[in-house]
Image (cartoon, grey):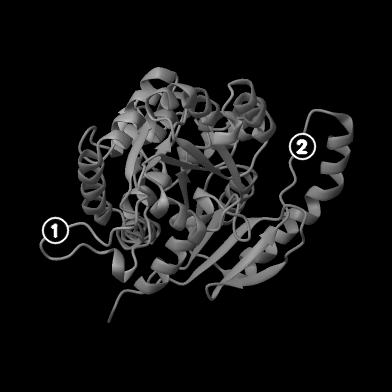
């Protein structure tokens, strides 16, 4: 008789229709777990949109209220009024779905409610950190004692704790009391045309403009992502590559400041703000660019790294945290200190000015990305689920 696989509730801080790293990770992992035979449901935070219950990719998704107390009196009154109904909603979800295990992704208010349910019901808890403790512009864990205490309890009592990179796991050990923990990385989808040919050549190439110079970057327009550093490097880059131009995808609180910086530096005409992009649009932009740049001050993993590798486009990235663990400097990408505008400009300029070098980087990235598909990620989680279920029996 085949082993009955545990039923999993993936409890995520954010999900579709919102777009981002954790949303992509949970969505793709849920589908891959289903292929392995795990019954899966997704519980996520209701941001006030009252989305209720939905199905995404055929998987049940519950949008649950997750109020937390805050320091000001009005917020405390709001929490006192809303919390009982919110907890009842979470309890009702548990009764309806009967998960064998609660797997928290990106610990936040979702993690506090899941931990409370785990403690009350005796259900095993897994925690996966996506860098929320190291790459948050708003320092939620520094501001909220509830989150700090809740995460400490969760990592101490969880059946397993994972992080998307060694830097993430290290932070949990150093600041939140984690004593074990393993790395389970992010993944990326590879279409049939994206797989390398048997002789290990790179996949389909894309047309290049006659004069190289298109730089593409994408992500949340927040300080931690370092796009101000990239804009500050642009005048240095254009001193070497006169036609260099930056196409910047994404939205966020720093857009106005970035526009102002570009005007101040005299490069406003060379920076195009593309706004929020769909995954297909991101792929098209990468395929049309001459270099993808990831200039983050902190970057827990960097799904953009995998997307750049998949796109057959050369990559320049921050020498910090997750990208520094992934990228082999000078082989499948270039690592650089993003806070040094001249160094960042020089790294990008070399790629733009040396097409054979750029092609070698891109080809190596195309080969490397094969290591980061979603099925191995789901299989790693499945092993943890099954071990947790056996430990409970």
Q: Quadrant of the N terminus?
A: bottom left
The residue under label 1 is 200
Q: Secondary structure at mark 1?
A: loop
- Which residue is nearer to you in this view: 268 or 364? 268
Q: Is residue 307 left or right of residue 138?
A: left
Query: Going 10% across and 62% down the picture, which residue do you hit?
Result: 199
Question: Where is residue 203 shown, x and y percent of the image?
Answer: 24, 61
Identify whether 183 is placed above or below 236: below
Chain-order first, disc 1 or disc 2: 2
Name the disc covering residue 50, or none: none
Vertical position of residue 153 compared to residue 57: above or below:
above
- Asked which secondary structure carries label 2, the reply is loop
User: Residue 324, image x and y in percent?
Assistant: 32, 32
Residue at position x 46%, y 52% in the image: 285
Q: Which residue is mark 2?
A: 69
Which image quadrant for residue 62?
Answer: bottom right
User: Which of the two marks, 1 or 2, is nearer to us in this view?
Assistant: 1
């Amino acid at each position: 008789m085949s082993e009955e696989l545990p039923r999993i509730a993936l409890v995520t801080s954010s999900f579709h229709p919102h777009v981002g790293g954790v949303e992509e990770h949970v969505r793709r992992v849920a589908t891959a777990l289903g292929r392995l035979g795990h019954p899966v449901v997704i519980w996520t935070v209701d941001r006030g949109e009252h989305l209720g219950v939905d199905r995404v990719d055929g998987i049940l998704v519950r949008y649950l209220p997750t109020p937390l107390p805050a320091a000001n009196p009005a917020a405390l009154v709001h929490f006192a009024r809303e919390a009982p109904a919110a907890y009842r909603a979470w309890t009702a979800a548990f009764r309806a779905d009967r998960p064998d295990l609660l797997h928290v992704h990106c610990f936040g208010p979702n993690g506090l409610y899941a931990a409370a349910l785990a403690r009350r019901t005796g259900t095993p808890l897994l925690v996966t950190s996506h860098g929320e403790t190291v790459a948050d512009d708003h320092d939620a864990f520094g501001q909220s004692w509830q989150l700090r205490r809740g995460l400490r309890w969760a990592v101490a009592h969880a059946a397993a704790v994972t992080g998307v990179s060694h830097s993430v796991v290290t932070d949990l050990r150093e600041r939140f009391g984690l004593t074990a923990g393993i790395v389970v990385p992010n993944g990326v989808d590879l279409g049939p045309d994206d797989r390398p040919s048997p002789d290990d050549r790179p996949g389909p190439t894309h047309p290049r403009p006659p004069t190289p110079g298109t730089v593409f970057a994408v992500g949340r327009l927040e300080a931690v992502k370092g796009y101000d550093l990239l804009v500050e490097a642009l005048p240095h880059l254009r001193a070497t590559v006169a036609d260099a131009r930056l196409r910047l995808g994404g939205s966020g609180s720093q857009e106005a400041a970035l526009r102002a910086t570009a005007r101040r530096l005299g490069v406003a005409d060379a920076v195009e703000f593309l706004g929020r992009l769909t995954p297909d649009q991101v792929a098209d932009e990468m395929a049309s660019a001459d270099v993808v740049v990831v200039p983050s001050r902190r970057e827990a993993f960097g799904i953009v790294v995998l997307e750049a590798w998949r796109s057959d486009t050369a990559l320049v990235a921050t020498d910090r945290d997750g990208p520094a663990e992934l990228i082999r400097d000078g082989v499948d990408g270039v690592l650089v200190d993003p806070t040094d505008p001249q160094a960042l400009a020089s790294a990008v300029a070399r790629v733009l000015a040396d097409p054979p070098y750029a092609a070698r980087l891109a080809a190596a990235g195309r080969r490397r990305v094969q290591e980061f598909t979603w099925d191995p990620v789901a299989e790693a989680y499945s092993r943890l689920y099954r071990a947790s279920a056996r430990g409970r029996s």
